Image (spheres, coloured by chain):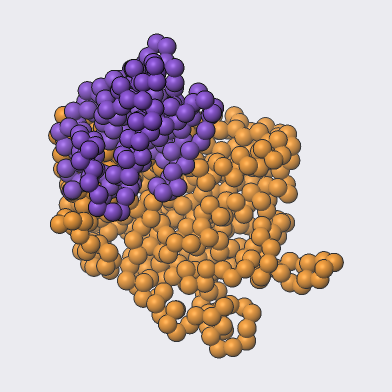
Chain colours: A purple, B orange
Amino acid sequence: MSQKSIYQEVILDHNRKPRNYGTLEHPTHHATGHNPLCGDRIDLDIDMQDGHIEKIAFRGESCAICKASSSMMTGVVKGKTQQEAEAMIQEFREMLISKEEKNFDHLNRLRVLAGIRDLPTRVKCAILPWHTLHAALNSTEGATTENDDHLNNELVVNNH
Amino acid sequence: MKIVDPLVASVAEQETAIDVERIRADFPILATKVGDKPLVYLDNAASSQMPQAVIDRLVRYQKTQHANIHRAVHHLSDIATQEYEEARRKLQHFIGAREDREVIFTSGTTDSINLVMHGYGRKFIQSGDEIILSELEHHSNIVPWQMLAEEKNIRIRVAPINDQGEILVEEYEKLFNENTRFVALSHVSNAMGTINPIKRMIAIAHQHDVPVLVDGAQAAPHLKVDVQELDCDFYVFSAHKMCGPTGVGILYGKAHLLEAMQPYKGGGDMIASVSFEKTTYNELPYKFEAGTPPIAAAIGFGAAIDYLEQIDLDVIAAYEHELLIYATEQIKMIPGVKIIGNSASKVAVISFVIDGVHPHDVGTLLNQDGVAVRTGHHCAQPIMQHFNVAATSRASFSFYNTKKEIDTLVAGIRSVQKVFV
């Protein structure tokens, strides 16, 4: 995928009109994700009911790729169990960093972000919201700093 | 062409005394394609490119002269030592130092600042003392002083900047008191290109008997520097921003200060004699050059100095200023684009933000047109905070850039805006 096609209409649309943008009044889970290299920061609120993500919202300042990834992520994980969401985090991550040719058809619309694999410096932008989701879902353990060694960057994610 | 500043106009109207196409031919990397587009390299403030003369010098050293220096008596070691010391003398003359022993080879600007922090700061600055920095420092000239401040309970005071990106010299002067022991200032801001009135600021510090370290990483490639005229106590810069290799830089220090300082690293050439009871340190400059130094890189640095001097720093400064004026005018004409830092006195660096577009998206999209700019906070987060932006895009020009390349940048900015409309 060429770099130009990264900024295709779907991504630009999510950047312009991010879905689930804002805050939840009584979130059961929350995390903040921060990429100190570029200053991107997102806050994620989740309301878990009966083991399912009932509501989810994000807010923050970020680039188009991070914002589109956040927006699409909140759309696809709504209604999922924690386990299902964790599986999606793993698969999404794999789609962006895997060296192997694999079929990611089951990720459906998230595949528009697959081309970012060709832009290693931007992979962290797309992955930040997913790290933040993982931190929020695991908020029982208190604040954590998570480094994705594979990306060799410093996405700092705190849950509280 | 509308020019506001008369000083700027007089420089811009000068004949271009540079044959840019001939110069570009000296830089093989400038023929690189990015996809199917010619490379437009506008990230010179991060690292500049290397001319063939410097590449050839590195190759010649590795092919015919390589050995460790100082220790052996054999032929190659003798040659390597002479060439390494010759490079030191080139640097000495380049900055107008009194003696070659005032020029210490380090691994770069950051290493030089750390050397002064450890060697001077830890010895002479104590609890309750104060250090003055400015708001436009980059992290390398903030963090080492913060480390010292934390260790010794020292207060750091920060000279503020105005919205043009200029240090408020009167406010800077007010920061001095009987506890002030050290000042560390950039000659030129890496994020905005502001040229500080450094000579005046040094004189103010000296009125209070306070020594000054000048971070010249962004100045030495673009301006003629004379450390004696400036009367700075320390001056630091790196080779890789001035057509030389990475991994080598300079600490200039006044000899009496360097002599009074503690060595920063132990081992190798910094030692005169060692027993388990006592070690005697070597004389300057070797006292601060522990271990095997970056010999090839230092010799390459010398070749880069030869190259720049053969073009002439004044000619380079005048041409780069012409590029700055042209780029500033072109970028200012684009609605929705704001230049961060508009000092009347600047080197050819333009930091800008595009309404509604994150700088990283700007950088990725400009790359499609072959244009290399830096995006981010430029390791100068206090400046970003001052202007209330998370990051900027920064185009920084060198004497091998052209107005046509600036046109490509400007067209690129316009097409970024189209994508995000």
For the point 34% across and 31% down, which residue is it?
Answer: A84
Left or right, B196 with respect to B116, comes to: left
Locate residue B346: give its quadrant: top left
Relative image position of residue A1 (x, y in whole percent): 18, 48
Task: Name the outermost residue toward the right.
Answer: B277
Visible residue check, residue B356: no
Question: Residue drawn at (31%, 39%), measured in percent from left and top?
Answer: A92
Left/right placement of residue B330 relative to residue A96 reads: left
Outermost top residue: A25
Extreme-bottom residue of the structure:
B75
In the shown orientation, is residue B187 left or right of residue B8?
A: right
Q: Position of residue B145 (x, y in %)?
A: 61, 42
Can the viewer see residue B132? yes
Q: Is residue B413 left or right of residue B228?
A: left
Closer to the camera in the image, B217 or A49: A49
Q: How many marks?
A: 0
Quarter-of-image position of residue A40 = top left
Position in image of residue A131 (x %, y %): 40, 35
**Looking at the image, residue A117 lies above or below residue A39:** below
- Residue B14: where, in percent of width, then height? 25, 52
Residue at 73% x, 66% y: name it: B281
Write the residue at 25% across / 22% down: A19
